[in-house]
Image (cartoon, rainbow, N blue to C red):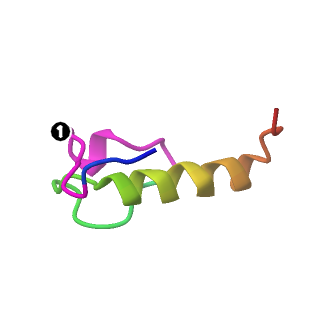
Amino acid sequence: MERYDSLVLFTPRIYSSLPGLPLKGEEQGFPTKDEIAAYLKNMWKRFNFPFN
């Protein structure tokens, strides 16, 4: 699936992450699509979610 390279969340990193698993980067910055994809992948690995 294709996405715009310029796609970013409209919520700052500090409000877009789980407690104890912060998004890397400036807290008030807006994460990119690639940062969110990497964050979700790391969360999946860390919490060992089943793959269905």
**In the picture provided, is 22 more to the left or to the right than 32?**
right
Q: Which residue: 77% across, 40% down?
A: 49
Q: Which residue is mark 1?
A: 10
Element type at mark 1: loop
Q: Which residue: 61% across, 50% down?
A: 43
Magenta extent: 5-20
**In the picture provided, is 35 more to the left or to the right than 51?**
left
Residue 38 is inside the magenta segment: no
In the image, farthest residue toward the front:
2
Q: Nearer the viewer, residue 38 or 24?
A: 38
Looking at numbered disc 1 in the image, what kind of residue is underneath it? Phe
Q: Which residue: 72% across, 55% down?
A: 45
**Secondary structure, magenta segment, majority class:** loop
Neighbourhood count class around disc 1 (C-alpha, 10 Å): few under 14, some 14–19, many 20 upward: few
Q: Quadrant of residue 32?
A: bottom left
Q: Nearer the viewer, residue 27 or 3?
A: 3
